[in-house]
Amino acid sequence: MIEVIEYKEGMEIKPPMFVANMPDDVYHAWPDSISKSGLDLVHRSPAHYKYRGASKPSRAMEFGKALHCAVLEPDVFASRYLLLRHVSDRRVSEYKQAVAAKGEGNVLVSGEADQIAGIQEVIASDFAVQKLVSKPHWTELSLFVNDPETGALVRVRYDMLTEDFEAVDLKTTQDCMPEAFAKSIAQYRYHVQAALYSDAFFWATGKPLADFVFLAIEKELPHARKLYTLDQESMRIGRVEYRKDMKVYYPAWEYDHWHGAEAEQVQSISLPNWAFARFEEEIVEEIF
């Protein structure tokens, strides 16, 4: 077991520390700490990280939060959220009354409600997923720990962490099949996340994660889903990537010097490969 501290307003963070039920806005704004999403910005340039705007909860973010709760904490979801599948107009009194009782972010209507309900239904009947998510676990568990190489304060948040140390990260996607989801992993740097979250756990506990599992779920019907773990080479690349980013972030933070990408010199740039392929297809069509 690990020691988990319940969040209290104004509490002091003494890393390494696992914190339960920390509000989203508090976690994301914790000072002098870096997260995976922060490293994504540093990967572009330290200036992109320094001048990032304060994120405001969007409808997509609210939907994602609700979906996580519906899949990983169905009992909590039932008491916290309300699905009005038959309501499509948020101006009607039924919606306004529901918002007054539950809060705007906790009331879902029409298509959003249909998606949540549909995903809940298929997840409930999926043996492999149920076997995993029914284990005793924490959800939205925050970890604050110092990077042993730079000393930087790192924060990660596990969608789900089981008591036998399996981390589960829920990802919605258009296509959960292996070839398509592998592209999402590369595009959104999920391999960096898997490596950082795994290493952060080891730094905090001296024990390895039993697994870091992606639960990929398609938002549209039939809500296909897959469970994935990354192979060792992908994890190695993720680790190399976040270490590069940490080496850029730490001196920028330490000396408060947040340089941006510089022009340096004129470079040649090319259209992406898909544009060339489309051009060739059009030429062939014109010929025939």
Image (cartoon, rainbow, N blue to C red):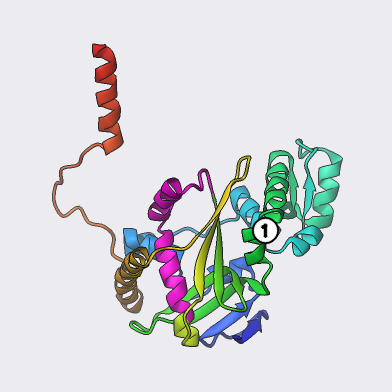
Question: Can residue 29 be spotted in the picture?
Answer: no
Q: Position of residue 101 (x, y in %)?
A: 84, 56
Q: State left or right for residue 2 relative to residue 81.
A: left
| Magenta-drawn stretch contains 176 | yes
Q: Amino acid at mark 1?
A: Val
Q: Point out the stretch of residues depicted in magenta.
A: 173-201
Taking the spot 38% from the left edge, 54% from the top edge, the residue there is 186
Q: State left or right for residue 223 relative to residue 214.
A: right
Taking the spot 21% from the left edge, 39% from the top edge, the residue there is 270
Question: Can residue 55 be spotted in the picture?
Answer: yes
Q: Quadrant of residue 44?
A: bottom left
Disc 1 marks which residue? 71
Q: Position of residue 151 (x, y in %)?
A: 38, 84
Q: Position of residue 56 (x, y in %)?
A: 57, 56
Depicted 114 relative to depicted 99: above or below: above
Depicted 216 relative to depicted 85: above or below: below
Depicted 258 relative to depicted 10: above or below: above
Q: Nearer the viewer, residue 83 or 160?
A: 160
| Kind of element beneath mark 1 | helix
Taking the spot 36% from the left edge, 65% from the top edge, the residue there is 238
| Magenta-drawn stretch contains 135 | no
Taking the spot 68% from the left edge, 81% from the top edge, the residue there is 8
Image quadrant in which the C terminus is located: top left
Q: Residues within 10 Å of mark 1 (few under 14, many from 20)?
A: many
Q: State left or right for residue 142 relative to residue 253.
A: right
Q: What residue occupies the far left of the structure in this picture?
A: 265
Q: Quadrant of residue 250?
A: bottom left
